Amino acid sequence: MHLRTWNELPEWMRNEEVRKYHEILKRKRFTLMLKRFFDVVMSLFLLILLSWLFLILSIWIKADSKGSVFYRQERITQYGKRFRIYKFRTMVSDADKIGALVTTANDARITKVGSKIRKCRLDEIPQLINVLKGEMSFVGTRPEVEKYVREYSDEMKATLLLPAGVTSFASIRFKDEDSLIAEYSQALGIDEAYIKKVLPKKMALNLEYIRQISFWNDVKICIKTVL
């Protein structure tokens, strides 16, 4: 996993808050190399191992509702690069055009099959493709849409020094994020509830991850995610 030099970073990322995290990662180059090696080997292995599950879920999704099997949305990853994330579709077609960019508990756009596979996070499995391509890592900050990245504080921008992740301590801690957003949105709009109430708490954990980054921490997070 390549870490750019300070002067190679996008200008909008070069601030003193980000510099502190960049210095930490400069001392962890071997960890970053090991992290990428793990990503490539495990994503390829799991894509082969779970190919039967891809087929079953694809048939189930197509039989349940109209639309494509996969949901692809533009997200932001390392250094502010745009990429299209792979997920199994769990909502009605064009859900982004008829509601918020985040979901809440009991969201009417979620399909019957979607509600079932979301509970087990099976909709996230296609992100193995993103990991293999290098757009994501197994562990890292969950990728946001550009709208929310524009709301990042100077310190939050440090999370973009690394590729976006499939899972993280924040993902585990906020596994019931939909319910939290629904609760906060009673007083605020859905977007405002996410930006002001949920995002700062998640990002605090993501920044702590960078401060404590190690290969064994990644292994622990992957195990906790499965459990």
Image (cartoon, helix red, strand yellow):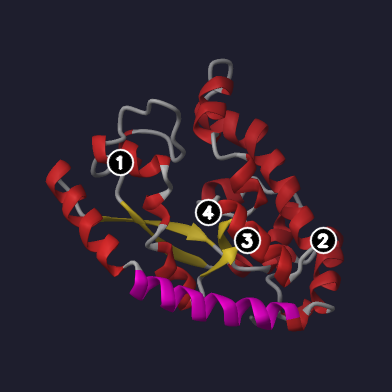
Q: Residue 160 placed where, x, y %?
A: 66, 63
Three-letter code for the amino acid on which mark 2 is drawn: Arg
**Residue 126 higher or lower than 40, as above or below:** above
Q: Residue 134 placed where, x, y %?
A: 51, 76
Question: Which mark lies nearer to you, 2 or 4?
Answer: 4
Q: Residues within 10 Å of mark 4 (few under 14, many from 20)?
A: few
Q: Which mark is residue 226?
A: 4
Q: Quadrant of the N terminus?
A: bottom right
In the structure shown, which secondary structural element does the residue marked by tag 1 occupy?
Answer: helix
In this rendered view, identify the residue nearer to me: 27 or 7. 27
Residues at marks 2 and 4, CA–CA distance in whole angstroms:
24 Å
Three-letter code for the amino acid on which mark 4 is drawn: Val
Marks 4 and 1 in Cβ contact (< 8 Å): no
Extreme residue in the front direction: 227
Residues at marks 3 and 4, CA–CA distance in whole angstroms:
16 Å
Query: In this figure, which residue is indicated by the disc labeled 2?
Result: 211
Using residue 49 as the reference point, say whether residue 22 is left or right of it: right
Query: In this figure, which residue is indicated by the disc labeled 3?
Result: 140
In the structure shown, which secondary structural element does the residue marked by tag 3 occupy?
Answer: loop
Marks 3 and 4 in Cβ contact (< 8 Å): no
Q: Answer yes or no: is residue 211 visible.
A: yes
Q: Residues within 10 Å of mark 2 (few under 14, many from 20)?
A: few
Query: In this figure, which residue is indicated by the disc labeled 1?
Result: 114
Specify start and end residues of the magenta stretch as a single range.
Answer: 31-49
Q: Residue 32 placed where, x, y %?
A: 70, 78
Residues at marks 4 and 1, CA–CA distance in whole angstroms:
19 Å
Residues at marks 3 and 1, CA–CA distance in whole angstroms:
24 Å
